[in-house]
Image (cartoon, rainbow, N blue to C red):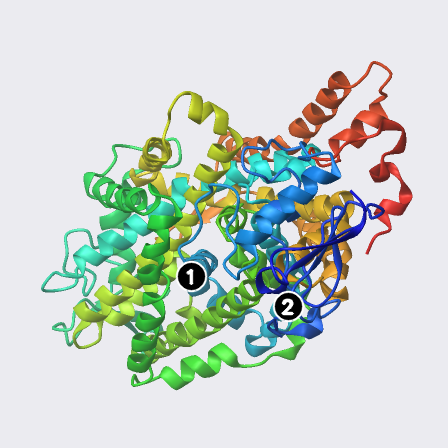
Amino acid sequence: MESGVSSLGPGGPNGLQLEGDTNQQQETAAIHPDHTVIKKTVIVRTDSSKPGNFLSFLRKEQAAHERPPSYSEAVPGAEAGQPPGDQGPSTEEGEWTHLVAKQKQQLDGNRQDDEDRVTWTNNLDFLLSIIGFAVDLANVWRFPYLCYKNGGGAFLIPYLVMLLLGALPLFYMELVLGQFHRQGPISVWRICPIFKGLGFCAVFVSFFVSFYYNVIIGWAFHFLISSFNYKLPWKDCMNEWNDPECAIKCVPVIDTENNITYSRLYKSDLNESGILSNITCQEARSPAKEYFNKAVLRVHESEGVYDLGTPQWQLILCIAAVYCLLYLSLFKGVKSSGKVVWLTATMPYVVLTILLLRGLMLDGAADGISFYLSVDWAKLRDEQVWIDAAVQIFYSVGAGFGVHLAYASYNKFHNNCYRDCLVTSAVNSFTSLFSGFVIFTYLGYMARSQGKDIENVADQGPGLVFEVYPQAVATLPGSQFWAVIFFFMLIMLGMDSAMGGLECVITGVMDEFKDFFQRHKISREIFTGLVVFSSFLVAISCVTPGGYYVFNLLEIYAAGLSLLTTVFFEGIAVSWVYGLTYFSNDIHAMLGHRPGLYWRFCWKFMSPLVLAGIIAIHMVDYGPFEMEMYDGKTYKYPAGAQWAGRILALSTMSCIPMAAIYAVVKAKKAGPKKRTWVQALGVAITPNYENVQDDNNARLTLAHYKQL
């Protein structure tokens, strides 16, 4: 076809004109109003349209008056029914015909994707879903504790530094990968087959985490149901499960004549005089602590991880309710889960606000907030503070679980995932800080009412939300109401993250083994039921009397190092092996602008360095695995249990080298006999939709790795 101009009608639709140019390179390009750009061998002209200008200073260039191409034009092998690697029509005539047909339906402002993949009903469904996954229980039970422990307001400095240099860039990277390639966390690594093990690792981690994470939501269900009693069961020490150490308040009594110190233990509000006891106030336990550990978990009936006992039917029903809700939310994909998040992602903020307003009226609330935000600049010289900040923000943002990849794969091709990334990160950090105000108003009140220092009241993890906070609300007028809305909030916070974790598993496996599911006619509804039910069966082990030992083992080893390793190699795979130039072009095709120097520098250098440091510290910081029990004793896990946890962690991380070896061997066998192992490596690191020339593979040259 000769160079020239062809109009689609008088000036074409919306003034569209196409110009052929047979001398141009085949590169992904955007469609610029009033500008000429290259799409394979075609130059496209369109009328003007004005883009947004959201934080443009972070962009490499502000592509004014730009409208990017459709998914099928930008992504190689994306045409409907076209397998990866097939570049479509090889002639210029075929490319011309293809583009003209597409422009008629896609350049009217309502472009349709060529594939039949389900998409979110609207962008808010997606945004609320990733916010809901990022904002979880850790925002309530871990961040406030870390903040007061590591210098109060000073902790925000390392927290924000680690967010900006590490977690935020990698979060954005995952959203871009998922949205551009529209594949789950396993299949998306067609861009670099040697790293496909990262997808399997992420899927296994998410599945293993569901074994214990959903049990936490089950505990919250148990407390929620118990909150409807006429009297909260953890309100006083007059129950059958209470020990002599139980007290709602403990006051030291000094006998000056005999130089002996006693304790006056108050068992209930009606016990105004208290009971003199030799039990010290340090040994005394709150009714909520005993209710959680003895009435709910029944850990006193087990001697350790090898003594599980019989599952408790009450907790089985609670976690069964959780898994039923998860199935109903997930079985239709994003069309069903996208509606659920409107409740689960927004309701916690309503409840937190109500709880904060009530907490500010309590005596001692100001002391709690002051303690929460008191600044200790000297803490910034402690390396552990920076480590805590890095670990907290990486886990909180949720990169590495594969969930963001899975969710983003259901986006429309031109969705502004750049904006979604910034909004989600800001909301996540705000929620962490805001929940700290809520928690510490009640901790200040509790410390004032019990005559204790706040540091002797504050706790983290399940101990904060199932022991400390319930005890605080039990002393309030209308305690049942405050307990109900608090545990309802915990359920909402947990459900979002639980949905995301299982969605990663479902999307990842069904995308990777699509042919298998189609051949055997296994629908999403059936596979979702299989995943949910299998996770439920394993979770039952955590609701036995010895289940808390299993829970703690899974919490330490199921994600931990595996998650950090996955995120680290994700950054290496995309920024170094796939190449920042290609990745920037992908972003340009979707959003109309390329990432600025900040993003590219963090992707290539800062984020991997931060993660490498955290991983190194984790690997050398392994000591005896111990757990503090409710009665103050310390349980040391036996060597066999510790090795079981390490094997669990290795089972996920081993996917990375195993898949890499498989990719190289496969490339060696699939190629000509003269293909060397180095050339096979080159094939394994090249996207499977690109034609590879063994003697001229750009990804085996030094110039490729100098890209920034």
Q: Which corner quadrant holds the N terminus?
A: top right
Res. 75 in view: no
At 33% from the left and 49% from the top, the residue drawn is: 336
Q: Earlier in the sequence, mark 1 or mark 2?
A: 2
| SS state under label 1 | helix
- With respect to residue 568, does 165 lie above or below? below
Q: Nearer the viewer, mark 1 or mark 2?
A: 2
The residue identified by callout 2 is 47
- Residue 447: image location, x then y, percent: 36, 76
The correct choice, above or below, for 87 with respect to 594 in the image is above
Kindly identify which numbered label has been placed on residue 128: 1
Q: Tell me which amino acid carries mark 2.
A: Asp
Residues under labels 1 and 2: Cα distance? 34 Å
Query: In the depicted view, which residue is nearer to us: 682 or 520?
Result: 520
Residue at point 25%, 35% (across, down): 311
Judge whether 355 appears above or below 568 on screen.
Answer: below
Residue 48 horizontal/vertical position (percent): 64, 71
